[in-house]
Image: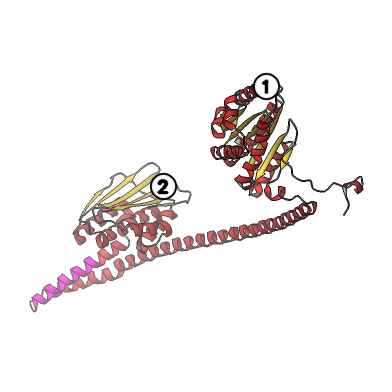
Amino acid sequence: MATSSTLRRNEAPPAPIAQSRDLGHLAHTVQFYGEDSFLLDELSRFVGTALGAGDAAVVIATKAHRDGLAERLKSRGLDAAKAIEQGRYVPMDAAETLAKFMRDGWPDAELFTEAVGSILGQAAVAAGGTNSHISAFGEMVALLWMQGNAEAAVRLEQLWNDLLQNYSMSLRCAYPMSGFDREYHCDSFLKICAEHSHVLPMETYTALIDEEQRLRSITHLQQKAQALEAEIAERKQAEEALHRTKVELESQVEQRTTALRQLSSRLLSLQDTERRRIARELHDSLGQYLVGLKLNVDMLRQSPARQELWSEAEVLMQQCIAEVRTLSYLLHPPTMDSAGFCSAARWYVEGFGQRSGLQVTLDAPDDLGRLPDAIELALFRVLQEALTNVHRHSGASATEILVRGEAERVVLQVKDNGHGIPQELLGRFRATGEGMGVGLAGIGERVRELGGKLKIESDSSGTLVRVTIPLHTDGSGELQV
């Protein structure tokens, strides 16, 4: 192996031994460490050497580190209490000192000089004058780093460098290496190192005293770095592939959701068309047949024979005509085509109250006017479904219906005094649109197709179903539960 005397002129020397001592005056050193015990051992040598030589020492650290340092100085035979009394040793709390010059998350230069510079000046005087040497240790920068304020930590290192020009001082900072465990820490880590005249690695390197061990250690670190870079590159490729897959799946889901909504809307439209056709046929065909049958029965009634049978037949035919008319109107109320939604709603609510036995009140304006056909039909289907649910499931005795027309929207509200909807069903409906039957799901789809909002509120005092449909829509609807 070549020695330093045989190295060629352009050859780099081997990796140096990391020494934490004899770094000279005006040195600004950063110490990285893994274990607190290692930091305290190094710090006790740094501060103990200064105090033993009659110099001053200023330590700005956490309480745990100040206490640990005091124990180690005592074990070295140094009287820290006497040095404190003399003013040569000044231990200070890092967080309290930091608070004196931080403003809005940034170190103020004037306040820093005032807070720290005055302490250094007093320590220098206590040690024998302005030419005496000071050994200063601070971990306020480490607190800023651990708070996630990396830029402020770098700025504070720069302020220390400015202050270093005014004193004969050896300055040391310390950071736990565990705080630099992410790839994005690299740039800030290099900036911190650049603000120091000396960088001391953590104990796993400083423990190596043999040149061969140091070279092997560096080679091992290089291998780890290479492997890490390869893993990072592979991870980025995997993340990019996963992102592309996610985008494709989201696109497919969106396309299929749009297709399903279009299909659902189409099915609802076909259902309404078919209901309209069946209603017309019931009215025009079967209804007419029954009317003709009634006329024939009327003529047969004039015969005195079996008079009671003819009367019974007439009653049955009257019931058939009424049922067919009711069924026809329920499928598609003819009054809605001629007079609008409010007229159809009044007719339906009156018949529903008679059939169900519920107390039903309708508050609807007389001057609502005509609405677009799709909106009137949607409102009527919502009214039908909501009242059907009240009758079948709520256990209510009364229902209030409110219709309001505004300049830009129309509102339909159905409120009952029943026992309410179980919260778990509301939760499922909120999350998936399922769990409360196809009726409410159909209402939600109708309202969404028209760009409106469906809102359902329920507790032990009853349930409220509120539909708001804009008169001019952009096609984007909302479901609120």
Residue occupying the point 55% across, 34% down: 95
Q: Is residue 414 above or below residue 145?
A: below
Residue 212 horizontal side relative to residue 346, left or right: right
Give percent across and percent down for residue 421. Answer: 30, 57
Looking at the rendered structure, the number of numbered marks drawn on it comes to 2
Q: Residue at coordinates 54% horizontally, 40% vertically from top-left? A: 64
Q: How is the image coloured?
A: secondary structure
> Cα distance, mark 1 to mark 2?
85 Å
Q: Residue at the location (35% across, 59% down)?
A: 424
Reply above or below: 305 against 357.
below
Amino acid type at circle 2 is Pro
- Which structural element holds mark 2? strand
In the depicted structure, whether residue 338 falls above or below residue 95: below
- Residue 157 location (% of width, % of height): 67, 33
Residue bearing the label numbered 1: 128
Q: Main secondary structure of the magenta part?
A: helix
Q: Is residue 393 left or right of residue 156?
A: left
Q: Is residue 75 left or right of residue 171?
A: left
Residue type, label 1: Gly
Q: Is residue 120 left or right of residue 454?
A: right
Q: Is residue 313 magenta?
A: yes
Q: Quadrant of residue 325?
A: bottom left
Q: Which one is in front, 94 or 180?
A: 94
Q: Which mark is residue 470?
A: 2
Badge 2: how crowded within 10 Å, few (<14), some, or many (20+)? Answer: many
Magenta range: 300-323
Binning the other alpha carbons within 10 Å of mark 1 as few (below 14), some (14 to 19) or many (20 upward) gives some
Q: Is residue 107 magenta?
A: no
Mark yes or no: residue 179 visible: no
Mark 1 falls on what kind of element? loop
Q: Position of residue 24 (x, y in %)?
A: 75, 33
Tell me if I can see residue 325 in this picture: yes
